[in-house]
Amino acid sequence: MKYVEKTWITNPTWLPATWSRAGRAIRTTKDVEGWHNRLNRRAMKLKLSLYLVVTLLYKVANALPNDRPEKLKKKQGRILHLWDMLQNDEISVKVLLN
């Protein structure tokens, strides 16, 4: 436990804000994993050099959709609102988790 505290909690190099996803809009890695797999398949198939991989990354990043489905936006908004309420001591952790 001392290792975790020393390395991840109190170490100024790895502040919790840099690795914790708590209270942030994107809470899943599924989108990133899917994107990474597609990118990896394209790059490996073509056996690209680093320069061409960077070019591919740029093109793929510009092609990403900028918005999420309305249902997901509403759900995300509710979650962020609940986080704000928790931080302002308006609700308990138990209420947040229910």
Image (tube, helix red, strand yellow):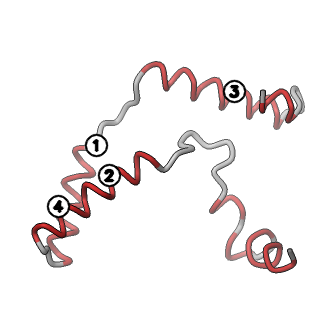
Q: Earlier in the sequence, mark 1 or mark 4?
A: 4
Q: What element carries label 2?
A: helix
Q: Look at label 3 and name its amino acid.
A: His
- The residue sitting at 54% across, 20% down in the picture is 74
Instruction: Using the numbered discs, state the Cα–Cα distance from disc 1 to disc 2 in whole angstroms.
Output: 9 Å
What is the crowding at mark 1: few (fewer than 14 residues within 10 Å), some, or many (at least 20)? few
- The residue sitting at 18% across, 70% down in the picture is 44
Vertical position of residue 92 compared to residue 14: above or below: above
Look at discs 4 and 3 and give the one toward the viewer.
4
Q: Earlier in the sequence, mark 2 or mark 3?
A: 2
The numbered disc on residue 81 is: 3
Give the residue at mark 2. Answer: 35
Give the residue at mark 1. Answer: 64
- The residue sitting at 25% across, 64% down in the picture is 40
Q: Residue 10's quadrant in the figure?
A: bottom right
Q: Which of marks 2 and 4 is nearer the N terminus?
A: 2
Do the residues bearing badges 1 and 2 touch, measured as CB atoms within 8 Å? yes
Instruction: Using the numbered discs, state the Cα–Cα distance from disc 1 to disc 4 in whole angstroms.
Output: 16 Å
Q: Residue 76's quadrant in the figure?
A: top right
